[in-house]
Image (tube, grey):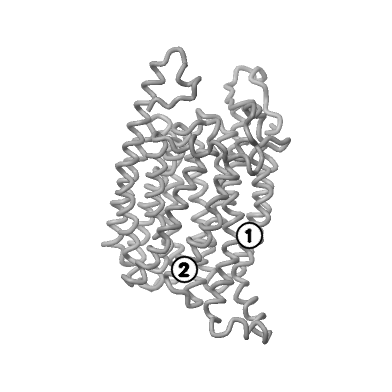
Amino acid sequence: MSLSNPPSPATPEGGKIFTIGTLSYTKGGLLLLFSWLMWNDLCLMLMENVAPTLFPLLLKDHHATNSQIAFFFSTLPGAFTIWINPVVSTWSDRFRSPAGRRRPFLLFATPFCAISLAAIPFMPDLFAYLNRIPAFVHFIGDHSAFVLVLFLGLCFLAYQVFNSVILAIFTYYFWDVVPQEVLGRFSALTKVVSTIAVFIWNYFLLGLADHHMKEVFVGVAVFFLVAYLVSLWNVKEGEYPPTQKGERTGFFGVIGSYFTDCFKPYYVWFIAANAIFQIGNMSNTFQIFIFRDQLHLDLDTIGKMKAIPTLLVVLVGYPMGALVDRLKPGRVMIASLALYGLANIGAFFFLNGKWSLCFFMGLIAIIVCAFGISQGVFIVEFFPREKLGQFCSANALTYNMTSLLAATFVGVFFDWIQNYRYAFLWSTAFYFLSLPLYVKCYLNWLRRQKLLASDSDGLLATAGENPA
């Protein structure tokens, strides 16, 4: 079936119809939808593994300090991209075009993202070429090493700017076209596909970066560009209701009621929990140095030891998603976060070789899968669906601002402690700090559901109230 012309609910001969908005799917249409969206996710996740893994190595190999790595990897991109998510997310909620409200943003950003990604490893060559020009050499003076790192950082910044547009929009795109009743299973499939992308990256491609860094960057960028655009072309959005009368839809008008809508106490607990959780994730950038510089493993071995156990996610991912559909996702989210912190403690003490690396990466992959699925479904239940982009952008704005402030401290921390193994304890500390906030969010959500259930006349929902 064509996804651009979904069947009417009366079309099939007794078959079940899955609907969301003006879109409706037979089981066959749903399978086709899932296939294209899984392809979309595979391309994106494969691209997402390249720069976060290899860019810190490029900086380190060109004599950047840990503080410089934190600055160019987190602080500088964060300072430029921190406002992109709120603007494009809220704008896309209210945007209307023949191509939909999400796809125009993705179609615009994808080519620029791919080009800037492919250019990153060529920055040392550009710097070497400019070094042949006397005026340039005179201009940079004795700061040659820093200027080379700066070249790499600015190219990575360009990649992050366009990538942030994609990351801000692509999840809402999924939520706009996937029926709610199968969202847990769909989220599970995205985790399975993401795991396959991680496996392909770690098992087949990461080892190549030792001697073919440029080819890896360019090859993945070209694959992402072509395959991602094809998938976007084949999954079209439905029709959306018109924006509310008097609501501003332009680039500079979409932030009007942004803060009063998004930062009510009910939502602040969840936004704060996510911000603290993301600070814990910041130390993941430095884990690669544990494996390469402290355990003395080459990239090929690291890649394979990380890839093999993640295949477990392929086996358990879909059943896990079906389980989240049946259980309350908030419960799974809280339990898996606690296990995530414990697994990091185990890695700190017992990860000492390639096989222990294999074990802990497999354990963490399964836990992250459970957390990601349950958190994704909980977000859809927790935030107002009609303004998902706006609320998710407020969430992203907050943790980006928090991460921006924390980026300096994580770099200074590793410069001071001179032991990358503490990356695991850094993560654990912030995961456990976020845990009681997630519990508070879940209890608020339960209370809200009870109040809405008792609101037989629908007055609270009609008024847009959050009784919690």
Instruction: Kindly identify which residue carries mark 2.
Output: 69
Q: Is residue 388 left or right of residue 136?
A: left
Nearer the observer, 146 or 289: 146
396 left or right of 215 in image: left
* Residue 417 lies in quadrant: bottom left
Quick check: marks 1 and 2 in contact, CB under 8 Å? Answer: no
**Left or right: 120 in relation to 195:** right
Give the residue type that dot 1 points to: Ala
Instruction: State the quadrant of the C terminus.
Output: top left
Q: Position of residue 47 (x, y in %)?
A: 57, 56
Q: Disc number at residue 221?
A: 1
Q: Position of residue 375 (x, y in %)?
A: 42, 40
Going 59% across and 25% down the picture, which residue do you hit? 19
Residue at the location (52% across, 29% down)?
A: 180
Mark 1 residue crowding within 10 angstroms, few (<14) / some (14–19) / many (20+): many
The answer to whether residue 373 is above or below residue 200 is: above
What distance separates the C-alpha of mark 1 from that of mark 2? 23 Å
Three-letter residue code for mark 2: Ile
Q: Camera-side residue: 145 or 12?
A: 145
